[in-house]
Amino acid sequence: MTRTIPQLVRDYLEERRIQRNRLVTKDGHCNIEYGHVWYSSHLAYLLDLWTTILELRLSVVMILFTCSFFLSWFLFSVLWYWIAYSNGDLWWQYPPNDHTPCVINVYGLTSAFLYSLTTQMTIGYSFRVITPVCPGAITLLVVQTIIGTIIKSVWCGIVISKFSLPKKRAKTIQFSETAVISPKDGSLCLQLRVANLRKTLLVGSNIYGKLLRTTVTPEGETIIMDQIKIDFLVDAGKDNLFFACPLTIYHVIDKTSPFYEMSVDTLQQQEFELVVFLNATDESTNFFCQVRTSYIPRELMWGYDFFPIITRNKDGTYCVDFSEFSRVVPVLTPHCPYCFDDEAAHNYNSKYQH
């Protein structure tokens, strides 16, 4: 069915509203604003300058990278200009023909800038060469060489660290767009799918969840972000997952689960956010990374299961069809967890195992 432009606008605004109301976005970013950060906190950011720079956007980092070099070149060019001025080397000072300059062919600010650039970047000397008649010039040459080496080393480390941040590895770990609630192994379970898009394995993987909702304590205190731990399992356990292919992880909805009091009719009226965390170490870089995503009630599909995406070819190789990664299919499911008692589970298993 084709939607009209007003409907598209309303859907877009509704989606924006939902994104603002999330604590964790689908791609793992935290939707939190910090207010009234005092002066001491800003000073702490400056003291931890390395982390502060790494957290900046790449475009800002490259601007700072360029400005730091240009600023150092210019500052040292002023010093070289001052040395040439002190020795009477400048063109407007009309040095005599037998005059020996501190730096040959540094006779103005432009030539001093060019000499500063070639000195700091060790490009090489040909037309402008330092002479041994000025001790101050030799000292400045040593100082600029050391400072230039430090600047290059620091920015080399920053750029490499920026490109190799563990959170970049998280971009190739994908969660399903929706989670499903359906029977599994005689229990009603909340299930979601996660996949590693690279062939390099994730070592020591473990996955868990936090259910965030607003609650009121018996004392009348309102907790805006009450966190309830949600345990997720795979058939082989919940820790040290073998992440060679997409996994379907599940949470058993039993009497200890916060989803136990919900049903297919009341699920969409609930206000909560299920945040899922995956911690792992990349075997190729040995970097630890954490991947996050979240699900709200409208993204939980009751009575559906994930479509199988792993097949085995005739030659014995395994094939994963990522085009069907988030596809779900309807399955027979009770409309509430407490309806899924032992007798119902027995009838369900009897029906689908024969």
Image: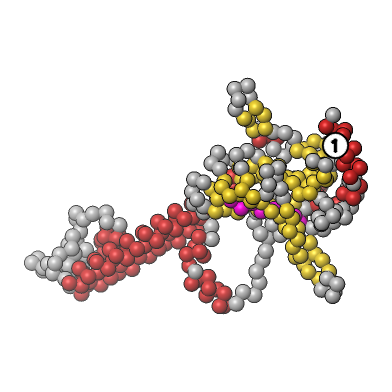
Q: Decide whether residue 116 is among the magenta residues.
A: no
Extreme-top residue of the structure: 314
Compared with 216, 159 (above or below) is above
Q: Name the residue under label 1.
A: 349
Q: Decide whether residue 279 is among the magenta residues.
A: yes
Amino acid tagged 1: Asn
Extreme-bottom residue of the structure: 39
In the picture provided, is 248 more to the left or to the right than 331? Answer: left
Tell me which residue sits at (83%, 32%) in the image. Answer: 353
Instruction: Give, as a single range, the part of the protein colored magenta.
Output: 273-280
Residue 73, image x, y percentages: 33, 63
Tell me which residue sits at (9%, 65%) in the image. Answer: 97
Residue 13, visible in the rendered structure: no
* Front residue of this view, candidates 55 and 9: 55
Compared with 10, 223 (above or below) is below
Residue 60, image x, y percentages: 50, 59
Residue 225, image x, y percentages: 75, 65
In the picture provided, is 135 more to the left or to the right than 228? Answer: left
**Location of residue 178 by image quarter:** top right
Tell me which residue sits at (63%, 45%) in the image. Answer: 241
Helix or strand or loop: what does disc 1 sit on? helix
Tell me which residue sits at (75%, 58%) in the image. Answer: 211
* Front residue of this view, candidates 92 and 29: 29
Residue 319, visible in the rendered structure: yes
Compared with 229, 313 (above or below) is above
| Secondary structure character of the magenta stretch overall | strand
Quarter of the image with the N terminus in it? top right
Tag 1: Cα neighbours inside 10 Å, few (<14), some, or many (≥20)? some
In the picture provided, is 110 more to the left or to the right than 322? Answer: left
* Front residue of this view, candidates 175 and 11: 175
Quarter of the image with the C terminus in it? top right
